[in-house]
Amino acid sequence: MFWSWPLDGWIIVVGVLCGVSSTLLGTFLMLRRMSLLGDAISHAVLPGIALAFLWTGSRSSLPMFLGAVIVGVLTAFFTEWVRRVGRVDEGASMGVVFTTLFALGLLLLVGAADQIDLDVDCVLMGNIEMTPLDRIAVGSLWVPRSALTLGGVTLINLLFVMIFFKELKLFCFDPALASATGFSASLLHYVMMIMVAVTAVASFEAVGSVLVVAMLIVPAATASLLTTRLSHLLVVGCIIAALTAVIGHLGVIAIPPQLGLKSAKTAGGMAIAAGLLFSLAVFFAPHEGLIPRFVRQRRLSQQIMLDDVLAFLFRLREAGDASAVSISRVSDQLMIPELRIRRSIAQLLADGLVEEIGEAIRLTGMGSKRATDLVRSHRLWETYLSDHAGIAPERLHDKAEKLEHFTDPGMRKRLDQQTAASIDPHGRPIPDEAGGERD
Protein backbone atom coordinates (compact mmCIF):
# COMPACT_ATOMS: atom_id res chain seq x y z
CA MET A 1 0.00 0.00 0.00
CA PHE A 2 1.57 3.27 -1.14
CA TRP A 3 1.22 6.15 1.33
CA SER A 4 2.22 9.78 0.89
CA TRP A 5 1.50 12.31 3.63
CA PRO A 6 1.42 15.36 1.29
CA LEU A 7 -1.30 13.58 -0.70
CA ASP A 8 -3.04 10.95 1.45
CA GLY A 9 -2.62 12.79 4.74
CA TRP A 10 -4.33 15.94 3.47
CA ILE A 11 -7.09 13.90 1.83
CA ILE A 12 -7.87 12.34 5.22
CA VAL A 13 -7.70 15.74 6.94
CA VAL A 14 -10.24 17.16 4.47
CA GLY A 15 -12.47 14.11 4.96
CA VAL A 16 -12.27 14.39 8.76
CA LEU A 17 -13.09 18.11 8.70
CA CYS A 18 -16.04 17.47 6.38
CA GLY A 19 -17.30 14.69 8.65
CA VAL A 20 -16.92 16.57 11.95
CA SER A 21 -18.44 19.82 10.66
CA SER A 22 -21.39 17.93 9.17
CA THR A 23 -21.94 15.73 12.23
CA LEU A 24 -22.06 18.68 14.62
CA LEU A 25 -25.17 19.94 12.80
CA GLY A 26 -26.43 16.59 11.51
CA THR A 27 -26.97 15.41 15.10
CA PHE A 28 -29.55 18.13 15.66
CA LEU A 29 -31.14 17.51 12.26
CA MET A 30 -31.52 13.85 13.22
CA LEU A 31 -33.09 14.72 16.57
CA ARG A 32 -35.55 17.02 14.80
CA ARG A 33 -36.31 14.33 12.18
CA MET A 34 -34.92 16.55 9.40
CA SER A 35 -31.86 14.52 8.38
CA LEU A 36 -32.75 14.62 4.69
CA LEU A 37 -32.53 18.41 4.63
CA GLY A 38 -28.81 18.02 3.91
CA ASP A 39 -29.70 15.83 0.94
CA ALA A 40 -32.19 18.45 -0.24
CA ILE A 41 -29.65 21.27 0.05
CA SER A 42 -26.84 19.34 -1.65
CA HIS A 43 -29.11 18.76 -4.67
CA ALA A 44 -30.78 22.15 -4.66
CA VAL A 45 -27.54 24.18 -4.83
CA LEU A 46 -27.08 23.22 -8.49
CA PRO A 47 -29.03 26.22 -9.89
CA GLY A 48 -27.00 28.52 -7.63
CA ILE A 49 -23.77 27.21 -9.14
CA ALA A 50 -25.11 27.54 -12.68
CA LEU A 51 -26.52 31.05 -12.12
CA ALA A 52 -23.26 32.20 -10.54
CA PHE A 53 -21.37 31.08 -13.64
CA LEU A 54 -23.88 32.66 -16.04
CA TRP A 55 -23.81 35.91 -14.07
CA THR A 56 -20.05 36.23 -13.70
CA GLY A 57 -18.81 34.17 -16.66
CA SER A 58 -16.19 32.76 -14.32
CA ARG A 59 -15.61 29.36 -12.75
CA SER A 60 -13.77 30.82 -9.76
CA SER A 61 -14.74 29.30 -6.45
CA LEU A 62 -16.03 32.39 -4.62
CA PRO A 63 -18.95 33.32 -6.93
CA MET A 64 -20.06 29.69 -7.19
CA PHE A 65 -19.75 29.26 -3.44
CA LEU A 66 -21.87 32.35 -2.79
CA GLY A 67 -24.46 31.30 -5.38
CA ALA A 68 -24.71 27.84 -3.90
CA VAL A 69 -25.00 29.18 -0.34
CA ILE A 70 -27.76 31.59 -1.32
CA VAL A 71 -29.79 28.83 -3.00
CA GLY A 72 -29.05 26.48 -0.10
CA VAL A 73 -30.43 29.01 2.37
CA LEU A 74 -33.46 29.57 0.13
CA THR A 75 -34.00 25.80 0.13
CA ALA A 76 -34.31 25.85 3.91
CA PHE A 77 -36.68 28.83 3.84
CA PHE A 78 -38.83 27.42 1.02
CA THR A 79 -39.02 24.04 2.78
CA GLU A 80 -40.40 25.66 5.92
CA TRP A 81 -42.74 27.92 3.89
CA VAL A 82 -44.18 24.98 1.91
CA ARG A 83 -44.65 23.02 5.14
CA ARG A 84 -46.62 25.84 6.75
CA VAL A 85 -48.63 27.09 3.79
CA GLY A 86 -49.24 23.71 2.18
CA ARG A 87 -49.84 22.01 5.55
CA VAL A 88 -47.71 19.01 4.61
CA ASP A 89 -45.05 17.26 6.66
CA GLU A 90 -41.41 18.28 6.45
CA GLY A 91 -40.41 15.27 4.35
CA ALA A 92 -42.94 16.16 1.65
CA SER A 93 -41.97 19.84 1.66
CA MET A 94 -38.29 18.91 1.25
CA GLY A 95 -39.17 16.67 -1.67
CA VAL A 96 -41.15 19.41 -3.40
CA VAL A 97 -38.45 22.07 -2.98
CA PHE A 98 -35.28 20.15 -3.74
CA THR A 99 -36.66 18.30 -6.77
CA THR A 100 -37.94 21.59 -8.22
CA LEU A 101 -34.65 23.41 -7.66
CA PHE A 102 -32.59 20.44 -8.83
CA ALA A 103 -34.63 20.26 -12.05
CA LEU A 104 -34.15 24.02 -12.52
CA GLY A 105 -30.42 23.58 -12.12
CA LEU A 106 -30.36 20.83 -14.74
CA LEU A 107 -32.27 23.03 -17.18
CA LEU A 108 -29.80 25.86 -16.64
CA LEU A 109 -26.89 23.49 -17.21
CA VAL A 110 -28.44 22.16 -20.43
CA GLY A 111 -29.09 25.72 -21.63
CA ALA A 112 -25.47 26.68 -20.95
CA ALA A 113 -23.93 23.36 -21.98
CA ASP A 114 -21.51 24.94 -24.44
CA GLN A 115 -20.20 27.41 -21.89
CA ILE A 116 -20.11 25.49 -18.63
CA ASP A 117 -17.88 22.57 -17.78
CA LEU A 118 -19.26 20.50 -14.91
CA ASP A 119 -18.58 16.79 -14.50
CA VAL A 120 -21.65 14.95 -13.19
CA ASP A 121 -19.39 12.35 -11.56
CA CYS A 122 -17.56 15.18 -9.80
CA VAL A 123 -20.87 16.62 -8.58
CA LEU A 124 -21.87 13.27 -7.05
CA MET A 125 -18.51 11.99 -5.76
CA GLY A 126 -16.52 15.21 -5.45
CA ASN A 127 -12.84 15.54 -6.22
CA ILE A 128 -11.24 15.04 -2.82
CA GLU A 129 -8.23 13.32 -4.39
CA MET A 130 -7.24 16.61 -6.03
CA THR A 131 -7.66 18.86 -2.98
CA PRO A 132 -3.97 18.60 -1.94
CA LEU A 133 -3.01 20.19 -5.29
CA ASP A 134 -5.00 23.39 -4.69
CA ARG A 135 -2.86 24.84 -1.92
CA ILE A 136 -2.48 28.15 -0.11
CA ALA A 137 0.65 29.24 1.73
CA VAL A 138 0.13 29.62 5.49
CA GLY A 139 3.48 30.83 6.73
CA SER A 140 5.97 28.22 5.66
CA LEU A 141 3.29 25.52 5.26
CA TRP A 142 1.28 24.86 2.13
CA VAL A 143 -2.29 23.94 3.13
CA PRO A 144 -5.06 22.78 0.77
CA ARG A 145 -7.66 25.49 0.27
CA SER A 146 -10.45 22.98 1.06
CA ALA A 147 -8.82 22.17 4.41
CA LEU A 148 -8.76 25.85 5.33
CA THR A 149 -12.37 26.35 4.25
CA LEU A 150 -13.68 23.27 6.05
CA GLY A 151 -11.48 24.00 9.08
CA GLY A 152 -13.12 27.42 9.40
CA VAL A 153 -16.60 25.94 8.96
CA THR A 154 -15.84 23.26 11.57
CA LEU A 155 -14.66 25.89 14.07
CA ILE A 156 -17.78 28.02 13.50
CA ASN A 157 -20.07 25.01 13.89
CA LEU A 158 -18.28 23.94 17.07
CA LEU A 159 -18.56 27.41 18.60
CA PHE A 160 -22.25 27.57 17.62
CA VAL A 161 -22.98 24.24 19.31
CA MET A 162 -20.99 25.13 22.44
CA ILE A 163 -22.53 28.59 22.87
CA PHE A 164 -26.12 27.56 22.16
CA PHE A 165 -26.00 24.01 23.51
CA LYS A 166 -28.84 24.45 26.05
CA GLU A 167 -31.01 26.28 23.54
CA LEU A 168 -30.40 23.65 20.88
CA LYS A 169 -31.28 20.89 23.35
CA LEU A 170 -34.60 22.56 24.17
CA PHE A 171 -35.16 23.36 20.51
CA CYS A 172 -34.81 19.69 19.53
CA PHE A 173 -36.82 18.12 22.32
CA ASP A 174 -39.42 20.77 23.21
CA PRO A 175 -39.68 23.76 20.81
CA ALA A 176 -42.72 25.12 22.67
CA LEU A 177 -40.79 25.26 25.95
CA ALA A 178 -37.87 26.82 24.10
CA SER A 179 -40.10 29.66 22.91
CA ALA A 180 -41.62 30.03 26.39
CA THR A 181 -38.19 30.54 27.96
CA GLY A 182 -37.70 33.72 25.97
CA PHE A 183 -35.76 32.92 22.80
CA SER A 184 -37.18 32.41 19.33
CA ALA A 185 -37.20 28.76 18.29
CA SER A 186 -38.05 29.88 14.77
CA LEU A 187 -35.00 32.14 14.61
CA LEU A 188 -32.75 29.33 15.90
CA HIS A 189 -34.25 27.04 13.25
CA TYR A 190 -33.34 29.40 10.42
CA VAL A 191 -29.87 30.09 11.81
CA MET A 192 -29.20 26.37 11.94
CA MET A 193 -30.55 25.90 8.41
CA ILE A 194 -28.21 28.63 7.15
CA MET A 195 -25.28 26.88 8.84
CA VAL A 196 -26.31 23.54 7.35
CA ALA A 197 -26.42 25.17 3.91
CA VAL A 198 -22.97 26.73 4.36
CA THR A 199 -21.52 23.44 5.62
CA ALA A 200 -23.04 21.45 2.78
CA VAL A 201 -21.81 23.87 0.13
CA ALA A 202 -18.33 24.16 1.69
CA SER A 203 -18.06 20.36 1.59
CA PHE A 204 -19.76 19.99 -1.78
CA GLU A 205 -16.85 21.00 -4.00
CA ALA A 206 -14.33 18.75 -2.26
CA VAL A 207 -16.31 15.64 -1.45
CA GLY A 208 -19.47 15.75 -3.58
CA SER A 209 -23.11 15.37 -2.64
CA VAL A 210 -22.91 11.66 -1.73
CA LEU A 211 -20.42 12.13 1.09
CA VAL A 212 -22.06 15.35 2.30
CA VAL A 213 -25.36 13.51 2.77
CA ALA A 214 -23.60 10.53 4.36
CA MET A 215 -21.73 12.70 6.86
CA LEU A 216 -24.83 14.72 7.78
CA ILE A 217 -26.82 11.57 8.57
CA VAL A 218 -24.81 8.40 9.18
CA PRO A 219 -22.34 9.30 12.00
CA ALA A 220 -25.11 10.83 14.10
CA ALA A 221 -27.39 7.85 13.44
CA THR A 222 -24.57 5.46 14.37
CA ALA A 223 -23.82 7.37 17.58
CA SER A 224 -27.50 7.27 18.55
CA LEU A 225 -27.22 3.48 18.74
CA LEU A 226 -24.28 3.77 21.15
CA THR A 227 -25.40 6.52 23.52
CA THR A 228 -28.48 8.57 24.37
CA ARG A 229 -26.95 11.56 26.17
CA LEU A 230 -26.74 14.55 23.84
CA SER A 231 -23.21 15.66 24.77
CA HIS A 232 -21.95 12.09 24.35
CA LEU A 233 -23.91 11.80 21.11
CA LEU A 234 -22.03 14.76 19.64
CA VAL A 235 -18.60 13.51 20.75
CA VAL A 236 -19.17 9.92 19.64
CA GLY A 237 -20.65 11.09 16.33
CA CYS A 238 -17.59 13.24 15.58
CA ILE A 239 -15.26 10.34 16.45
CA ILE A 240 -17.21 8.06 14.11
CA ALA A 241 -17.06 10.70 11.36
CA ALA A 242 -13.27 10.93 11.75
CA LEU A 243 -12.92 7.13 11.70
CA THR A 244 -15.09 7.04 8.59
CA ALA A 245 -12.66 9.33 6.75
CA VAL A 246 -9.59 7.38 7.85
CA ILE A 247 -11.02 3.90 7.17
CA GLY A 248 -12.62 5.00 3.90
CA HIS A 249 -9.43 6.41 2.41
CA LEU A 250 -7.19 3.59 3.63
CA GLY A 251 -9.70 1.11 2.22
CA VAL A 252 -9.67 2.83 -1.17
CA ILE A 253 -5.86 2.63 -1.21
CA ALA A 254 -5.63 -1.01 -0.14
CA ILE A 255 -8.70 -2.87 -1.43
CA PRO A 256 -9.15 -1.99 -5.16
CA PRO A 257 -5.71 -3.36 -6.18
CA GLN A 258 -6.60 -6.65 -4.47
CA LEU A 259 -9.72 -6.83 -6.65
CA GLY A 260 -7.88 -6.01 -9.85
CA LEU A 261 -9.20 -2.42 -9.99
CA LYS A 262 -6.98 0.50 -10.86
CA SER A 263 -8.61 2.99 -8.50
CA ALA A 264 -11.76 4.00 -6.68
CA LYS A 265 -13.28 7.26 -5.53
CA THR A 266 -12.24 8.22 -2.00
CA ALA A 267 -15.56 9.93 -1.27
CA GLY A 268 -17.40 6.76 -2.20
CA GLY A 269 -15.06 4.72 0.01
CA MET A 270 -15.73 7.05 2.95
CA ALA A 271 -19.49 6.77 2.41
CA ILE A 272 -19.20 2.97 2.34
CA ALA A 273 -17.09 3.07 5.53
CA ALA A 274 -19.82 5.14 7.19
CA GLY A 275 -22.39 2.52 6.21
CA LEU A 276 -20.18 -0.30 7.50
CA LEU A 277 -19.70 1.40 10.87
CA PHE A 278 -23.45 1.92 11.10
CA SER A 279 -24.02 -1.75 10.29
CA LEU A 280 -21.61 -2.79 13.04
CA ALA A 281 -23.48 -0.59 15.50
CA VAL A 282 -26.82 -2.05 14.38
CA PHE A 283 -25.58 -5.56 15.19
CA PHE A 284 -23.19 -5.03 18.11
CA ALA A 285 -24.17 -1.81 19.98
CA PRO A 286 -24.25 -2.73 23.71
CA HIS A 287 -27.83 -1.62 24.35
CA GLU A 288 -29.52 -1.27 20.96
CA GLY A 289 -27.60 -3.80 18.88
CA LEU A 290 -29.49 -6.76 17.47
CA ILE A 291 -27.09 -9.38 18.83
CA PRO A 292 -26.84 -8.05 22.43
CA ARG A 293 -30.60 -7.57 22.42
CA PHE A 294 -31.08 -11.15 21.22
CA VAL A 295 -28.73 -12.42 23.96
CA ARG A 296 -30.63 -10.44 26.62
CA GLN A 297 -33.95 -11.77 25.38
CA ARG A 298 -32.63 -15.33 25.46
CA ARG A 299 -31.35 -14.84 29.00
CA LEU A 300 -34.65 -13.33 30.08
CA SER A 301 -36.57 -16.18 28.46
CA GLN A 302 -34.36 -18.69 30.24
CA GLN A 303 -34.78 -16.90 33.59
CA ILE A 304 -38.57 -16.86 33.20
CA MET A 305 -38.51 -20.60 32.49
CA LEU A 306 -36.43 -21.21 35.63
CA ASP A 307 -38.91 -19.16 37.66
CA ASP A 308 -41.85 -21.08 36.21
CA VAL A 309 -40.30 -24.41 37.23
CA LEU A 310 -39.71 -23.16 40.79
CA ALA A 311 -43.23 -21.75 41.08
CA PHE A 312 -44.71 -25.01 39.79
CA LEU A 313 -42.82 -27.05 42.38
CA PHE A 314 -43.97 -24.64 45.11
CA ARG A 315 -47.63 -24.93 44.10
CA LEU A 316 -47.42 -28.72 44.07
CA ARG A 317 -45.99 -28.69 47.58
CA GLU A 318 -48.61 -26.18 48.65
CA ALA A 319 -51.32 -28.54 47.35
CA GLY A 320 -49.96 -31.33 49.59
CA ASP A 321 -47.71 -33.12 47.11
CA ALA A 322 -44.40 -32.99 49.01
CA SER A 323 -42.75 -35.79 47.07
CA ALA A 324 -40.15 -35.25 44.39
CA VAL A 325 -41.54 -34.52 40.92
CA SER A 326 -40.45 -36.26 37.73
CA ILE A 327 -38.93 -34.16 34.96
CA SER A 328 -41.45 -35.47 32.45
CA ARG A 329 -44.30 -34.28 34.67
CA VAL A 330 -42.78 -30.79 34.88
CA SER A 331 -42.47 -30.78 31.10
CA ASP A 332 -46.08 -31.88 30.59
CA GLN A 333 -47.55 -29.41 33.08
CA LEU A 334 -45.62 -26.40 31.79
CA MET A 335 -46.05 -27.53 28.15
CA ILE A 336 -42.34 -27.03 27.43
CA PRO A 337 -40.22 -29.60 25.52
CA GLU A 338 -38.45 -31.96 27.90
CA LEU A 339 -35.02 -31.16 26.43
CA ARG A 340 -35.43 -27.47 27.34
CA ILE A 341 -36.76 -28.39 30.79
CA ARG A 342 -33.71 -30.60 31.38
CA ARG A 343 -31.38 -27.72 30.48
CA SER A 344 -33.27 -25.45 32.88
CA ILE A 345 -33.14 -28.03 35.66
CA ALA A 346 -29.40 -28.44 35.10
CA GLN A 347 -29.07 -24.70 35.75
CA LEU A 348 -31.28 -24.92 38.86
CA LEU A 349 -29.16 -27.81 40.16
CA ALA A 350 -25.98 -25.81 39.57
CA ASP A 351 -27.48 -22.84 41.45
CA GLY A 352 -28.53 -25.05 44.37
CA LEU A 353 -32.24 -24.23 43.97
CA VAL A 354 -33.40 -27.82 43.43
CA GLU A 355 -32.01 -31.22 44.32
CA GLU A 356 -32.15 -34.37 42.24
CA ILE A 357 -33.60 -37.62 43.56
CA GLY A 358 -33.21 -40.26 40.89
CA GLU A 359 -35.16 -38.97 37.87
CA ALA A 360 -37.14 -36.54 40.02
CA ILE A 361 -36.45 -33.13 41.58
CA ARG A 362 -37.62 -31.10 44.57
CA LEU A 363 -36.95 -27.67 46.01
CA THR A 364 -34.03 -26.99 48.31
CA GLY A 365 -34.28 -24.45 51.12
CA MET A 366 -32.82 -21.73 48.88
CA GLY A 367 -35.10 -22.76 46.04
CA SER A 368 -38.11 -22.70 48.34
CA LYS A 369 -37.32 -19.09 49.31
CA ARG A 370 -37.04 -18.05 45.66
CA ALA A 371 -40.27 -19.89 44.78
CA THR A 372 -42.08 -18.30 47.73
CA ASP A 373 -41.06 -14.83 46.56
CA LEU A 374 -42.35 -15.57 43.06
CA VAL A 375 -45.73 -16.91 44.22
CA ARG A 376 -46.08 -14.09 46.74
CA SER A 377 -45.35 -11.52 44.00
CA HIS A 378 -47.88 -13.20 41.69
CA ARG A 379 -50.70 -13.21 44.23
CA LEU A 380 -49.97 -9.70 45.47
CA TRP A 381 -50.20 -8.46 41.89
CA GLU A 382 -53.48 -10.31 41.35
CA THR A 383 -54.91 -8.73 44.50
CA TYR A 384 -53.64 -5.27 43.59
CA LEU A 385 -54.92 -5.41 40.01
CA SER A 386 -58.30 -6.65 41.21
CA ASP A 387 -58.68 -4.04 43.95
CA HIS A 388 -57.17 -0.97 42.26
CA ALA A 389 -57.53 -1.60 38.52
CA GLY A 390 -60.85 -3.45 38.55
CA ILE A 391 -59.57 -6.27 36.34
CA ALA A 392 -61.85 -9.31 36.15
CA PRO A 393 -60.58 -12.44 37.99
CA GLU A 394 -60.31 -14.50 34.80
CA ARG A 395 -57.86 -11.96 33.34
CA LEU A 396 -55.65 -11.57 36.41
CA HIS A 397 -53.40 -14.62 36.06
CA ASP A 398 -51.76 -13.76 32.72
CA LYS A 399 -51.04 -10.18 33.74
CA ALA A 400 -49.66 -11.14 37.16
CA GLU A 401 -47.52 -13.87 35.60
CA LYS A 402 -45.73 -11.27 33.47
CA LEU A 403 -45.14 -8.95 36.40
CA GLU A 404 -43.98 -11.50 38.96
CA HIS A 405 -40.62 -12.02 37.25
CA PHE A 406 -39.68 -8.34 37.59
CA THR A 407 -40.85 -7.72 41.16
CA ASP A 408 -38.08 -7.02 43.65
CA PRO A 409 -38.43 -6.97 47.49
CA GLY A 410 -39.08 -3.22 47.50
CA MET A 411 -41.94 -3.57 45.05
CA ARG A 412 -43.40 -6.48 47.05
CA LYS A 413 -43.28 -4.34 50.17
CA ARG A 414 -45.19 -1.53 48.44
CA LEU A 415 -47.74 -4.01 47.07
CA ASP A 416 -48.09 -5.46 50.56
CA GLN A 417 -48.86 -2.00 51.92
CA GLN A 418 -51.48 -1.41 49.23
CA THR A 419 -53.24 -4.77 49.71
CA ALA A 420 -54.57 -5.85 53.09
CA ALA A 421 -56.05 -9.24 52.07
CA SER A 422 -54.54 -12.53 53.22
CA ILE A 423 -55.90 -14.40 50.19
CA ASP A 424 -55.81 -13.52 46.52
CA PRO A 425 -58.96 -13.03 44.37
CA HIS A 426 -58.96 -16.77 43.59
CA GLY A 427 -59.10 -17.73 47.26
CA ARG A 428 -55.48 -18.87 47.55
CA PRO A 429 -53.35 -17.79 50.56
CA ILE A 430 -50.72 -15.12 49.99
CA PRO A 431 -47.46 -16.34 51.58
CA ASP A 432 -45.45 -13.88 53.64
CA GLU A 433 -41.77 -13.12 53.11
CA ALA A 434 -40.80 -15.94 55.47
CA GLY A 435 -42.80 -18.51 53.52
CA GLY A 436 -45.80 -18.83 55.83
CA GLU A 437 -49.32 -17.62 55.22
CA ARG A 438 -50.07 -13.94 55.53
CA ASP A 439 -51.98 -12.87 58.64
Image (cartoon, rainbow, N blue to C red):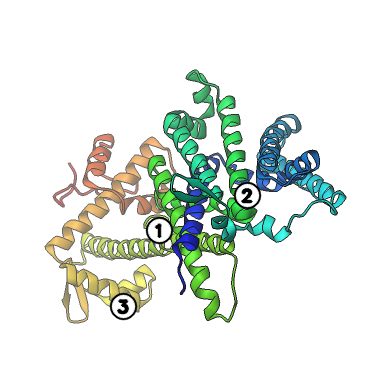
Q: Which of the two residues, 71 or 51, is positioned nearer the viewer here?
A: 51
Q: Which of the two residues, 107 or 122, is positioned nearer the viewer here?
A: 122
Disc marking residue 328 = 3
In this view of the protein, can residue 323 be seen by the observer?
A: no
Q: Secondary structure at mark 1?
A: loop
Res 330 → quadrant:
bottom left
Residue on which disc 2 sits: 204
Where does the image place residue 254, in percent across and percent down from the top left?
49, 73
Choose the circle earlier in sequence order: 1 or 3.
Answer: 1
Seen in the image, is 99 located left or right of residue 239? right
Instruction: Residue at 22% x, 42% y: name it.
Output: 410
Q: Quadrant of the C terminus?
A: top left
Give the mark toward the camera: 3 or 2: 2
Give the mark toward the camera: 1 or 3: 1
Q: Are marks 1 and 3 in contact (CB under 8 Å)?
A: no
Res 58 → quadrant:
top right
Figure disc tally = 3
Residue on which disc 1 sits: 285
Q: Secondary structure at mark 3?
A: helix
Q: Amino acid at mark 2?
A: Phe
The image shows residue 94, relative to residue 182, as above or below, that is below
Choose the circle earlier in sequence order: 2 or 1.
Answer: 2
